[in-house]
Each structure stands twice: as structure tokens, then as C-alpha cells.
Amino acid sequence: NTDSFKEQFLCSVCLDVFTDPVSIPCGHNFCKACISEYWNTTALCQLAQVQQMIQERQDPELRRIRQWSVDVTLDPDTAHCKLIVSEDRKQVSYGDVRQILPDLPERFECYLSVLGKEGFSSGRFYFEVQVRGKIEWQVGVARESIIRKGPTAVSPEGGLWALYMNRNKYIAKDTPHMHLFPSQKPQKVGVFVDYKEGQISFYDVENMSHIYSFTGCTFTEKLYPYLNPCDNEEGPNSAPLVISPVNHTD
């Protein structure tokens, strides 16, 4: 998705490709000329002014998209046996110990994955997942026929449209995979699906910005929310992925 790639190099003030880019201490990047009026030589960053400026440039599309939010719960019958699904079915974490569970046909055998309880085969839907405190995770949408008992094909061809993070490196598992460069580390990811238009989009909920979109997709079966909290091989990663209620007043 060339347009999404280009968005990573646009200044939030002039909305054009960076000219003489500078990075300020709060972590945001701007053209040097654009940020100069907000820059205080006696303070490293007038954070309130910068935050207000970013608020004004936020993606208005996400506010509209939130009207299609759905109440997602996880389906324990699909969860890999090393995953722990909370009693309210809103959280999933890696448990390290293989649980003795029924070998159901819908249960993931190789990938540390779990699906939402309800699938969608028309219209639009949106949900949010908190990823705070994790060093590796995968969030997205899977079709009903995704492989459960062998290596899951992590691509649209295999029935998975996902955003992957590993130690602050972000990848859209498209064909080919796309390396992404968010302006900040997302703590909560919004996932929007337009079934008819064949589009799946990801957003950073906290700064209301677009991360990536899979477009031109053709859906012919039910789609389910997909979560993979990943294991501890890269380091401590026991924090759960959490299905979060959508706050329409943000």
C-alpha cells in the first residue's frame, strides 16, 4: 500500500513530505520550518502546544468509524492450549504451560492464537485491542477457514490480515510484508472491517491516527477478530491483549 507507506513521512503541520526534518524530545517529527513557531528556546518542547496541533491533525475518519463498534468476546474453544483466556473472555495471555484441553477441530494447534466468538459476513465492524506492556503481539482479522491444525499462513492468501509488532518493529502481514513506522508506539489498536468494500484498516487509538489498510480484498466467508499475544522468547511478554470498550467521546 504505497499511500500508507508515504503517510509515515508526512509532516503533521503542512501535511507534506518532511523538509529538513527534526525530531523533538516528546518523540514527534516535523519539518524544521513548521515546528519553529511552536519551539521554545527556553524549554525543549512546549508539549501542550504540540499536542493541540496534533489533535487538530488527527484522522477524523476514526471518529466516524467508531460508530460500527461491536462487542467482541473471545472463543476459548479456538485458543491454543498455552493461552489463558480470562473468565469474562475479554483478555488473552501466554501461559507457558500446556493445558490439557479437548482437541477441538476449531482449536489452534501451532500458532498462539484465539478468535472472537462471533463472525461477520457482511457490513462493517470495528473493535479495539489494548497492547500496552507487550514486546510482541499480533492483532487482526481471520477468515473462518484459516488453518488451525498446521502452520497458519500469516498472509491474506492464508486467510489472515494482521498487524505484527516485535520489539517496536511493526509489520503489516500483507503480500509482500510491509514495514511500518508509526509516529509513536501504539498502546491500543483499532481494527475496522468493511466487508463489502474489501478493506481492513488499523488505527492508533490514542492519537487517532491511521496505521495501515489492506485494500482490494475479496471476502467470501465469515471474518473473526484474531489475537495472538505471542510467547516469551523475545523477553518478558506476559501482559495480556485486552478487548477494550470503545469510548465514543474521545
Image (tube, helix red, strand yellow):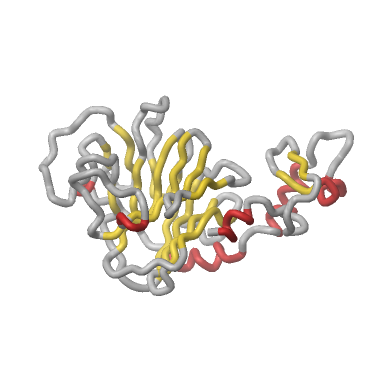
Q: Residue at x 74, y 58 (%)?
A: 16
Q: Residue at x 36, y 28 (%)?
A: 232
Residue 250 in sight here: no
Q: Residue at x 82, y 51 (%)?
A: 34
Q: Is residue 148 left or right of residue 139?
A: left
**Residue 103 drawn above or below residue 193:** above
Considering depth in this image, is 106 or 18 the residue closer to the camera? Answer: 18
- The quarter of the rendered structure image containing the C terminus is bottom right
Considering depth in this image, is 128 or 160 the residue closer to the camera? Answer: 160
**What is the residue that sits farthest to the front in this orientation?**
176
User: Can you give x and y, in whole percent of width and height, for residue 47 in the image?
Assistant: 75, 42
- The answer to which quarter of the image holds residue 191 is bottom left
User: Can you give x and y, in whole percent of width and height, for residue 219 in the image?
Assistant: 33, 68
**Residue 240 drawn above or below residue 62:** above
User: Can you give x and y, in whole percent of width and height, for residue 96 in the image?
Assistant: 27, 28
Residue 217 in sight here: yes
Considering depth in this image, is 56 or 110 the residue closer to the camera? Answer: 110
Q: Residue at x 54, y 44 (%)?
A: 186
Q: Is residue 191 left or right of residue 34?
A: left
